Amino acid sequence: MGLIVILICFGVGGGLIGKAKGSSFFLWFLISFCVPFIGLLTAIVYRSDKDELRRQCPGCGRVVKIHDAICTRCGTELDFPDVAIAPESQARRRAGAAAESAG
């Protein structure tokens, strides 16, 4: 019984960290639950999707992560762009700073 509680705690911890980094809670819960120490450490060092550069699809105009090879909306094959769009984390900081200066 104690082992199940420990596994659930590791699973919830990994899930919350994964969700905070922009990934799936359920996926990281399963990884951290099945492989407790390694799963949690992997969730901690996993890249944050909010800090990834983005680009605009030439086919449909959707903004996707720069590392995506195919647009998930229209299926257009994407080449590496000359110009990248700032990550979501920087866009949110700028919007917050603009709201503070206006208010």
Image (cartoon, rainbow, N blue to C red):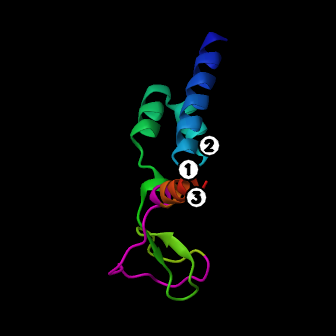
Q: Residues within 10 Å of mark 3 (few under 14, many from 20)?
A: few
Marks 1,2: beta carbons within 8 A: yes
Please give the residue where the numbered disc 3 appears in the rendered image.
102
Q: Which residue is mark 1?
A: 23
Question: Residue 96's spot in the image, x, y percent?
Answer: 55, 54
- Estimate the spatial distance between the alpha carbons at disc 1 and disc 3, rounded to whole Å: 33 Å
Q: Residue at x 58, y 37 (%)?
A: 15
Which circle marks residue 58 in the picture?
Answer: none
Image quadrant where one finds the N terminus: top right
In the displayed orientation, state which residue is furthest to the right.
1
* Picture coordinates of residue 69, whole percent (x, y): 44, 74
Range of residues picked out in magenta: 73-90
Between discs 1 and 3, the one toward the N terminus:
1
- The quadrant holding residue 5 is top right
Instruction: Give SS at disc 2.
Output: helix
User: In which quarter of the view is residue 84 placed?
Assistant: bottom left
Q: Position of residue 47 (x, y in %)?
A: 41, 49
* Badge 3 amino acid: Ala
| Residue at image point 49% right, 31% down | 35
Which mark is nearer the camera, 3 or 2?
A: 3
Q: Is residue 44 magenta?
A: no
Label 1: few (<14), some (14–19) or many (≥20) C-alpha neighbours in 10 Å:
some
Disc 2 target residue: 25
Compare marks 3 and 2 and give the one earlier in the sequence: 2
State the CA–CA distance, disc 3 to disc 2: 36 Å
Mark 2 is surrounded, within 10 Å at the Cα level, by few (under 14), some (14 to 19) or many (20 or more) other residues, namely: some
Q: Amino acid under label 1?
A: Ser
